[in-house]
Image (cartoon, rainbow, N blue to C red):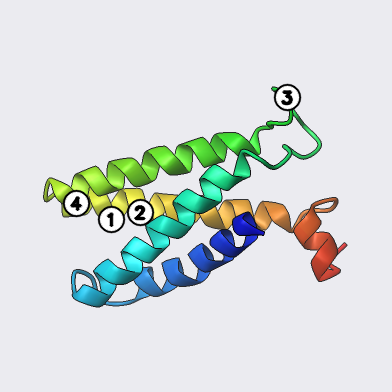
């Protein structure tokens, strides 16, 4: 449930952050919330199965996206702390696009979310 909560929070909060004005206190506050949700989502994924393609134990290719999310967020935070706003923006946008890709993947046949939503 932590993974679902964090992921869906990330989808919503991330969209708000990307669509509104940058750099003010609300951007920073929502950004902290988004980063927290994404770290929780990525870390909690390692206790979930890898779907139909497990590679190592119960980990599958989707867990590579979790690793990438942690790297992208780390690099984005480092960039903004160093004043590299353009790099920060690129890393954060890329991380959000990765989140959208993961969400689309959950809507595929045989995935738990698609079954719960009655899609397939």
Quadrant for residue 8, please give it: bottom right
Q: Give the mark nearest the N terminus, 3 or 4.
A: 3
**x%, y% of residue 28?**
25, 67
Closer to the chain start, of discs 4 and 1, is 4
Q: Which quadrant, please, contains the N terminus? A: bottom right
Q: Secondary structure at mark 1?
A: helix
Residue sitting at x 47%, y 59%? 37
Residue 72 on image: x %, y %: 38, 42
- Cβ atoms at labels 2 and 4 below 8 Å apart: no
The residue that mark 1 highlights is: 89
Instruction: Give residue 2's quadrant in the image.
Output: bottom right
Foreground tag (3 vs 4): 3
Circle 3 sits on which residue?
57
Q: Give left or right: position of 82 versus 37.
A: left
Marked residue nearer the N-terminal end (2 or 4) = 4
Task: Find residue 57 and report its horizontal and vertical position in percent.
Answer: 73, 24
Residue drawn at x 71%, y 55% as measured from the top left: 106
- Contact between marks 3 and 4 (CB within 8 A): the answer is no
In the image: residue 90, left or right of residue 65: left
Answer above or below: position of 56 versus 104: above
Q: Nearer the viewer, mark 1 or mark 3?
A: 3
Residue occupied by mark 4: 80
Query: Which numbered disc flags the more N-terminal residue, 1 or 3?
Result: 3
The residue at 39%/37% (across/down) is: 71
Q: Nearer the viewer, mark 4 or mark 1?
A: 4
Label 3 Cα neighbours within 10 Å, binned few <14 / some 14-19 / many ≥20:
few
Quarter holding residue 78: top left
Find the distance from the CA under tag 4 to the CA under tag 1.
Answer: 9 Å
Estimate the spatial distance between the alpha carbons at disc 3 and disc 4, rounded to whole Å. 36 Å
**Within 10 Å of the Cα at label 1, are there few (<14), some (14-19), or many (20+) other Cα atoms?**
some
For disc 2, the marked residue is: 92
């Amino acid at each position: 449930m932590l993974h679902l909560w964090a992921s869906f929070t990330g989808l919503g909060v991330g969209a708000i952050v990307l669509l509104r004005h940058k750099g003010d206190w609300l951007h920073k506050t929502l950004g902290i919330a988004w980063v927290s949700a994404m770290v929780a989502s990525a870390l909690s994924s390692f206790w979930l199965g890898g779907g139909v393609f497990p590679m190592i134990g119960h980990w599958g290719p989707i867990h590579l996206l979790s690793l990438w999310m942690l790297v992208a967020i780390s690099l984005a935070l480092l960039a903004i702390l160093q004043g590299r706003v353009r790099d920060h923006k690129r890393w954060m946008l890329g991380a959000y696009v990765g989140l959208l890709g993961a969400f689309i993947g959950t809507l595929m046949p045989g995935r738990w979310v698609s079954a719960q939503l009655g899609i397939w």
